[in-house]
Image: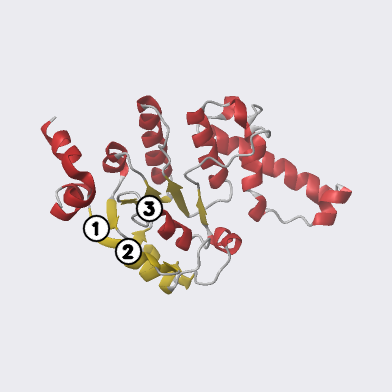
Amino acid sequence: MTALLEVNNIAKRFGGLLAVNDVSFSIDEGEILAMIGPNGAGKTTAFNCVTGLYAISSGDIRFRGRSLVRLKPHRIAALGITRTFQNIRLFSYMTAVDNVMVGEHCRMQAHVWDAVLRTPKARREERDVATRAVRILARMGLEQYADTYAHNLPYGLQRRLEIARALASGPALLLLDEPAAGLNPNEKAELMGVISRLRDDGLTIFLIEHDMRLVMGVSDRIVVLDQGSKIAEGTPAEVRNDARVIAAYLGTAVTEERSA
């Protein structure tokens, strides 16, 4: 496989706090990489560094061979990296299809004056964007909710809608920050299917997640952080049997799951 994303010895400091310490890993095209670790391990900080929300203190991050250091988040998104967040950030009083259309903004070519004057170019692009948005909703099993306001959707469907909006920009790499947070067991099972189908469609996925059943079920490889440092990396089987990971994070839960 070819590395799509390369994270090389990155560090992130907040004053005297070293939140991420000399972390390196890569993500190959077409794989699902999970990052796990206890609360405060530096997982979301690493995500924020990849997507440009935080400037790294040292190291390098390369996407398709190009350094992302000092690029703004919108430039990184335009290159093909999009993300979701731990807390749902939908436009509550917009419909599902409108939320997805917002996600296509970075792909639109019409200028402001085209939109103001309602030129043929603007109208044609709006139709095309709406058509693509409906297709993305269908891909996520949400087509019947296209005209439903986001705040009226059940929580599990709001999670899926947020992923749909992230897909609207046509990413090559999708980052999911705790996508199963707040979901019930049935919704988590459906989410596993969604993530697997997206990978089967050619999307590369990088996720943070605390639900070990989901992580072990969908991931090709796992990176484990503890106190800002990487302590393990490998396949799900390798990670779940790593003594350092068990001591730092998995604890007795993995033992109980083995014996079940």
Q: Residue at x 42, y 54 (%)?
A: 44
**64, above or below 236, in the image:** below
Q: Earlier in the sequence, mark 3 or mark 1?
A: 3
Look at the numbered disc 1 and give the secondary structure of its residue.
strand
- Name the residue carrying label 2: 25
Q: CA distance from mark 3 to mark 2?
A: 16 Å
Q: Residue at x 27, y 52 (%)?
A: 221
Dot 2 amino acid type: Phe
Front-most of 245 and 147? Answer: 245
Tag of residue 30:
3
Residue 202 location (% of width, % of height): 42, 49
Q: Are marks 2 and 1 in contact (CB under 8 Å)?
A: yes
Front-most of 135 and 39? Answer: 39
Quarter of the image where the N terminus is located: bottom left
Residue 111 location (% of width, % of height): 79, 57
Q: Badge 2, how many Cα within 10 Å: few under 14, some, many 20+?
A: some
Q: Badge 3, how many Cα within 10 Å: few under 14, some, many 20+?
A: many
Q: Residue at x 42, y 68 (%)?
A: 13
Quarter of the image where the C terminus is located: top left
Left or right: 176 in relation to 167: left
Q: Badge 1, how many Cα within 10 Å: few under 14, some, many 20+?
A: some
Q: Residue furthest front?
A: 16
Nearest-to-viewer mark from 3 and 1: 1
Nearest-to-viewer mark from 3 and 2: 2
Dot 3 amino acid type: Gly
- Name the residue carrying label 1: 233
Q: Residue furthest bottom?
A: 58
Dot 1 amino acid type: Glu
Residue 107 location (% of width, % of height): 65, 54
Q: CA distance from mark 3 to mark 1?
A: 18 Å
Q: Residue at x 13, y 39 (%)?
A: 255
